[in-house]
Amino acid sequence: MTFLDMLRDASTRNNSMLCVGLDPEPTKFPAALRGDATKIYDFCAAIVDATADLVNSFKPQIAYFAAHGAEDQLEKLMAHMRKVAPHVPVILDAKRGDIGSTAEQYAKEAFERYGADAVTLSPFMGFDSITPYLKYEGKGAFLLCRTSNPGGDDLQAQTLADIPGQPRMFEHVAKLAQGPWNTNGQLGLVVGATRPHEIERVRAVAPTLPLLIPGVGAQGGDAVATVKAARIGGGPIIINSSRAVLYASQGEDFAAAARQAAMETRDTLNRAAALCD
Ligand SMILES: O=C(O)c1cc(=O)[nH]c(=O)n1[C@@H]1O[C@H](COP(=O)(O)O)[C@@H](O)[C@H]1O
């Protein structure tokens, strides 16, 4: 099954656009686990178990594991997700970007070592930095396009005067991903929920690509406006929330609270979609 097949299947089965981001930060764990980086797997596995029937994907952020030398726990978590939620695709958030020979190693890490279904990438180094990932048939690759952070303006909002139509950099990335770079239909785009108006601009040039949209929850993105904009064109939608789900409670009830937060977010997104119908 390809990443896109899995995404469609999980979205339908769980009636969900929600991706739970797995950004484990031991200082925010409940008291029994707090500050203990050897408990990263236990914490994340509990979140996965509590939310697997509510999501269309999971997105582990590799830095939260690597910073603690916890790559073995990420491998164990990948195996756990396969076991308890085999129908839910896993997007490894790694935001890699490097020359082709090095990108081959990063692609191997994402797809062979961790067995991810999709990965996040920076397109800054150009098409040859992306192609090694596209050799993995059926795997997804999400290119950073219009990111949720304030500094996203610094480069992504710049006008490219030498390109016909003078697009902004993020519009040009979206156009390349929808068109010439998407050689096997594996590409998607990352666009922030903090900028719903610009999601509309991305959809104008990339109507059918899957969009990975972080920024609801802790970053304050507008969930309703985001869904409305992302639905234009009909491409698949993945809306990520990490901290607002993971740390809904820092008590012993953290897994139940995460489930409740995920359910509320999923339902809010679905209500927004229903309003657009
Ligand atoms: O690629 C990403 O996932 C990403 C892109 C972006 O523009 N903004 C963004 O916040 N992210 C990631 O999405 C997650 C957002 O986490 P919360 O703000 O806690 O929901 C983090 O893992 C970020 O690294």
Image: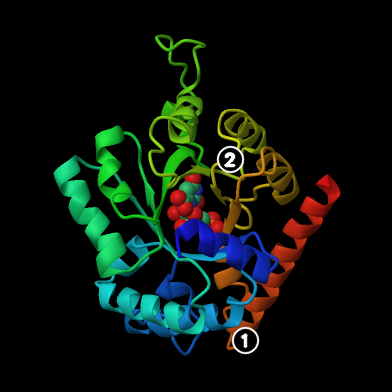
Q: Amino acid at mark 1?
A: Asp
Q: Which residue is mark 1?
A: 253
Q: Secondary structure at mark 1?
A: loop
Marks 2 and 1 sit apart, C-alpha to C-alpha, by 40 Å
Q: Earlier in the sequence, mark 2 or mark 1?
A: 2
Q: Is residue 45 left or right of residue 260?
A: left
Verify CB contact (< 8 Å) between mark 2 and mark 1: no
Q: Residue 164 at x, y = what percent?
A: 47, 10
Furthest-left residue in this view: 101
At x 26%, y 55%, the residue is 107
Q: Is residue 219 above or below residue 34?
A: above
Q: Amino acid at mark 2?
A: Thr
Q: Residue 109 at x, y = what percent?
A: 24, 62
At x 62%, y 72%, the residue is 248
Q: In what quadrant of the picture does the N terminus appear?
A: bottom left
Q: Is residue 125 visible?
A: no
Of residue 78 and residue 253, the one placed in the foreground of this image is 78
